[in-house]
Amino acid sequence: MAVHVVLNQKGGVGKSTLTMNLAAVKAHALTGDADVESPVAAISVDPQGSAVWWADRVEGSGNELPFKIAQAHDNPKILSQLHKLPGISHVYVDTPGWIDFSSNGDSADSLGAGASGDALRAVLSIADLVIVPIEPEPLCFDPTARTIKKVIEPLGKKFVVVINNWDPRDGKVDLEQTRAFVDAHGWPLARTVVRHYKVHTRAAADGRVVTEYDANRVSLQAREDFYKLSLELEAGGH
Ligand SMILES: Nc1ncnc2c1ncn2[C@@H]1O[C@H](COP(=O)(O)OP(=O)(O)O)[C@@H](O)[C@H]1O
Ligand SMILES: [Mg+2]
């Protein structure tokens, strides 16, 4: 049983994209094309529910979601039991697009006293691994550092930073700068970089997850990053 929580205070770094596609790849690896109950679940604690919107698009376009999905941002009791879901061996948790860390001293910690703080504390309490997506651009650095230093490290959670949305056409300068930033802090960094592909950007609106892309050369390259990342996370080398 493994619970992965995808977390970064910054919006738009790829939390929902990683959640949905890592769940899809894991489900594909575990069940193939067999018509069996999926042992994989994606859970959204993002009140805006973009993962669930995406899932609805998948089913609405006649594709099948290869994993189970549930919206559960307002039920911390259930959220702290995600590692005990019957029939589920892998859980991927999508977290809010943007998190406002509390700056006042009243609440328990920087996640704040509100419902979304409670939801995040609940899922983090049972997380086996926190996945921290970062984009290769300096705007992401401060929010990523705050997420790790104010939330993940104080809780003593195992985590890994994953560079997402790198466009090879932009050259390697930003990529190397991002790697250097992560290394300078001594944070574990996934070797796999998830590259930028239009097919990923369009996937939600198109109603597909990564395992359902067309089998053309570019889409297969785009898929490959998620299969590699999933294998790397499974191996736990970071
Ligand atoms: N590797 C990628 N390639 C192309 N587009 C991406 C990639 N990762 C994320 N995106 C796009 O960037 C936007 C933000 O991603 P999203 O997963 O919604 O971020 P978050 O959940 O952190 O707010 C979305 O439009 C998504 O499709
Ligand atoms: Mg999101």
Image: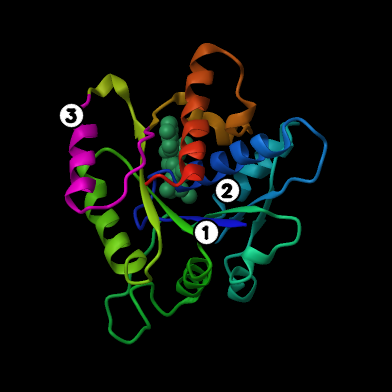
Instruction: Where is residue 168? Give x, y as percent.
Output: 30, 22
Question: Residue pushed farthest bottom?
Answer: 106
Asked whether mark 1 and ligand 2 are closer than 8 Å, the reply comes as yes
Foreground label between 3 and 1: 3
Disc 2 to disc 3, how far (Cα)? Answer: 32 Å
Instruction: Where is residue 142? Give x, y as percent.
Output: 22, 55
Which residue position is annotated with label 2? Answer: 51
Q: Are marks 2 and 1 in contact (CB under 8 Å)?
A: yes
Q: Residue at x 55, y 49 (%)?
A: 50
Foreground label between 2 and 3: 3
The relative height of residue 81 versus residue 90 in the rendered view (above or below) is below
What amino acid is found at the position of numbered circle 1 in the picture? Asp
Q: Are marks 3 and 1 in contact (CB under 8 Å)?
A: no
Which residue position is annotated with label 3? Answer: 173
Which residue position is annotated with label 1? Answer: 46
- With 56 as the anchor, is 6 left or right in this view? left
Quadrant housing the N terminus: bottom right
Disc 2 to disc 1, how far (Cα)? Answer: 8 Å
The relative height of residue 96 versus residue 26 in the rendered view (above or below) is below
